[in-house]
Image (cartoon, grey):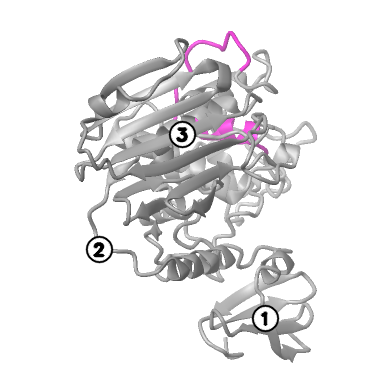
């Protein structure tokens, strides 16, 4: 069971709870940094342009009005909503215009440019220049290497599944906001780096008495009394968790009833590891805890003695690809989030699965082109009406699912889910 799974009270309909940017946008919206679009959405997957990025970060960093001086761009009028932020950014050396004299406010920005804009706006001291490549695809001599190194060290940004930063790719509104959020959160809490599991959803196994936080892009597989969590190696077309791929990882959690009532020390004395295993015992989250690391196989095993007397056993393994450092850090954060659970029994896994399913559908509201993929996840969608005129961009279909009792409003031409109604209806 994932907790919490309430998805009704979010500020933006296209950023529901238990999705990657929910914590980000709620935090920034509460501080008055973001407000979304006139239609009430945030559009987290949409690329962000220079004007939008400057406004967001200037408000976040509480940048005072810059001196306009003789700054002028033919494509930035004083009446433009972004004029103030452009002048602030340029006068402070955070951004600059192009050699042809334009600013190009509607031009998308990439990862490298985003890191520079955000860190300069917050007047961050980057420290010494990197002496090694921050990422496999970021040479330490690149102009943005120091920004990438700083963001990596403080976990403000996460690489792609292949372990590379791909700094040249356009950044989305959600990603840009997330870097700002992570910076502000760590400064506010006095932390050296952003705790990865801060906003991860919580999986609770009431029967076995534990809860654990899991990254958004890890899959869960129930296997009788065990639960498997799996990071799929998409770069290498991995289809099953059954073997480790270079950029993939697994974590299996099982609970031993420990009928003999052994302490963790006595319990562990009956387990044999090879001489190359690195074994450490300590207390974690208030529970007796033992970790085992075997370098030759990239395996990390963990044992908890829960207050109930059960022994919680965690077996994990990563591939040996470029994404290995990130996988290790994610597993470390997963293990660090494990807690004893003494709450009420879980009513039904089917209910939880349904809630999670609809959360996934809601996360794709107003994501252009996503409707086809989301519709394929349903087994029983029925077309109940078509608005041939639509909203000016073509026909709008209303598809109803009896199983989930929801209706999807879909713009046919762009394959976009416009809205979801929690009933059989065409009046929304």
* Nearer-the-camera pick, 388 or 267: 267
Q: Residue at x 58, y 67 (%)?
A: 361
- The quarter of the picture where the C terminus appears is bottom right
List the single residue furthest toward the top: 131
Q: Is residue 4 left or right of residue 21?
A: left
Which dot, 1 or 3, sits closer to the camera?
3
Quadrant of the rendered image containing residue 50: top right
Magenta stretch, residue numbers: 110-133
Instruction: Characterize the local packing of mark 1: few (<14), some (14-19) or many (20 or more) Cα atoms within 10 angstroms.
Output: some
Instruction: Give the structural element (helix, strand or loop) at label 2.
Output: loop
Instruction: Characterize the local packing of mark 3: few (<14), some (14-19) or many (20 or more) Cα atoms within 10 angstroms.
Output: some
Instruction: Give the structural element (helix, strand or loop) at label 3.
Output: strand
- Relative image position of residue 109 (x, y in whole percent): 67, 41
Instruction: Give the structural element (helix, strand or loop) at label 1.
Output: loop
User: Where 117 sits versus 276, above or below?
Assistant: below
- Label number found at residue 396: none
* Nearer-the-camera pick, 83 or 163: 163
Instruction: Characterize the local packing of mark 2: few (<14), some (14-19) or many (20 or more) Cα atoms within 10 angstroms.
Output: few
Q: CA distance from mark 1 to mark 3?
A: 40 Å
* Nearer-the-camera pick, 261 or 302: 261
Q: Earlier in the sequence, mark 1 or mark 3?
A: 3
Q: Is residue 70 visible?
A: no
Q: Is residue 47 visible?
A: yes
Q: Which residue is mark 3?
A: 315
Q: Which residue is mark 1?
A: 381
Whether residue 212 is in magenta: the answer is no
- Label number found at residue 344: 2
Q: Earlier in the sequence, mark 2 or mark 3?
A: 3
- Relative image position of residue 105 (x, y in whole percent): 68, 47
Q: CA distance from mark 1 to mark 2?
A: 34 Å
């Amino acid at each position: 069971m994932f907790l919490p799974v309430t998805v009704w009270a979010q500020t933006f309909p296209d950023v529901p709870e238990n999705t990657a940017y929910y914590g980000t946008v709620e935090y920034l919206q509460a501080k008055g940094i973001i407000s979304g679009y006139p239609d009430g959405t945030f559009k987290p997957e949409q690329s962000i342009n220079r004007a939008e990025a400057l406004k967001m970060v200037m408000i976040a960093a509480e940048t005072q009005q810059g001196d306009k001086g003789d700054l002028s761009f033919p494509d930035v009028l004083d009446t433009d909503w972004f004029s103030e932020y452009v002048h602030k950014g340029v006068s402070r050396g955070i951004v600059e215009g192009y050699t042809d004299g334009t600013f190009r406010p509607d031009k998308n920005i990439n990862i490298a440019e985003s890191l520079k804009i955000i860190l300069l706006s917050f007047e961050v001291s980057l420290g010494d220049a990197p002496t090694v490549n921050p990422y496999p695809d970021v040479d330490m001599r690149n102009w943005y290497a120091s920004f990438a190194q700083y963001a990596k060290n403080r976990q403000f940004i996460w690489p792609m599944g292949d372990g590379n930063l791909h700094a040249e790719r356009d950044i989305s509104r959600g990603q840009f906001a997330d870097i700002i959020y992570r910076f502000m959160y760590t400064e506010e809490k006095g932390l050296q780096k952003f705790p990865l599991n801060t906003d991860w959803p919580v999986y609770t196994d009431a029967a076995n008495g534990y809860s654990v936080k899991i990254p958004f892009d890890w899959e869960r597989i129930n296997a009788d009394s065990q639960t498997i969590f799996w990071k799929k190696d998409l770069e290498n077309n991995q289809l099953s968790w059954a073997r480790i791929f270079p950029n993939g990882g697994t974590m299996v959690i099982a609970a031993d009833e420990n009928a003999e009532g052994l302490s963790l020390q006595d319990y562990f004395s009956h387990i044999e590891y090879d001489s190359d295993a690195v074994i450490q015992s300590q207390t974690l989250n208030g529970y007796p805890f033992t970790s085992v690391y075997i370098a030759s196989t990239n395996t990390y095993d963990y044992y908890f003695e829960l207050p109930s007397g059960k022994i919680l056993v965690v077996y994990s393994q990563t591939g040996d690809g470029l994404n290995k450092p990130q996988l290790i850090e994610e597993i470390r954060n997963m293990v660090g989030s494990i807690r004893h659970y003494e709450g009420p029994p879980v009513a039904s896994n089917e209910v939880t699965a349904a809630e999670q399913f609809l959360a996934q559908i809601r996360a794709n509201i107003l994501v252009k082109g996503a409707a086809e993929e989301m519709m394929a996840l349903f087994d029983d969608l029925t077309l109940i009406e078509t608005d041939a005129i639509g909203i000016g961009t073509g026909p709008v279909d209303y598809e109803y699912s009896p199983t989930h009792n929801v209706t999807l409003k879909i713009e046919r031409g762009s394959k976009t889910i416009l809205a979801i109604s929690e009933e059989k209806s065409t009046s929304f």
